[in-house]
Image: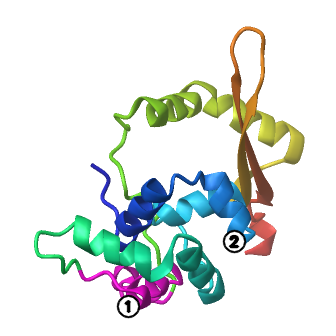
Amino acid sequence: MLDLPPHCHALLAAKTASNLTFAEIAKAVHKPEVWTTALFYGQATTDEPTAKALFEFLGGDKFLQSYNDDYSEDGKRGMTATKLVGALSGKGEGNMGVTGMVTRGGTFEMPPKDPVLYRLYEVLVVYGYSYKALIQEKFGDGIMSAINFRTSLERKPDPEGDRVVITLDGKFLPYSSPESW
């Protein structure tokens, strides 16, 4: 089981009940699909207008009432619009007293047991040094940023079976030279 913040369970329940895809939700709030999905798993925060738009698009108070009724023994789960929007906009109890603070990557163990996550991990185990060497050759001594970063996932038709195309698009960040110290 994933260790997700309470607002994520509410969002995922609303998504399931609505039969919406992450692509449809992302389009409705005018944000990238992978980033929007990260909101549902507690790996990102957003501004308050986007949090409110997401809440309303998923059904607003109607979905919260249903969530609170369905997922608690006494019908008093305690998820409110204020708590949900606050958590999405970085002001929830999971932010550990610092607005916008998110514990990224803390939702599963390493190496991951889930087959999809394990295969992504395996890609880095098998090709990580190749990526590192190619970054060094093409850019110099540095890293690909995961902060100044974009990613997407596409389905690519192929006669031998459809392909999963994941794009990792990070800014190159050179290491400091000793002279800059």
Residue type for callout 1:
Gly
Closest to the observer, 75 or 149: 75
In the rendered structure, find residue 29 and report the number of the disc placed on it: 2
| Vertical relation: 124 (above or below) 8 | above
- Are dots 2 and 1 in contact, CB under 8 Å? no
Residue range (magenta)? 78-99
Residue furthest left as drawn: 74
Q: Secondary structure at mark 2?
A: helix
Residue at the spot of label 1: 97
At x 73%, y 62%, the residue is 27
Q: Is 177 on the left or on the right of 14, as rendered?
A: right
Report, in whole angstroms, how far the alpha carbon at label 2 lies from the one at label 1.
Answer: 27 Å
Residue 109: x, y in percent?
Answer: 32, 46
Residue 73: x, y in percent?
Answer: 11, 69
Badge 1 crowding class, 10 Å Cα cut-off, few under 14, some 14 to 19, many 20 or more, is few
The answer to which quarter of the image holds residue 155 is top right
Of callouts 2 and 1, which one flags the residue occurring earlier in the amino acid sequence? 2
Closest to the observer, 137 or 74: 74
The answer to which quarter of the image holds residue 150 is bottom right
Badge 2 crowding class, 10 Å Cα cut-off, few under 14, some 14 to 19, many 20 or more, is some
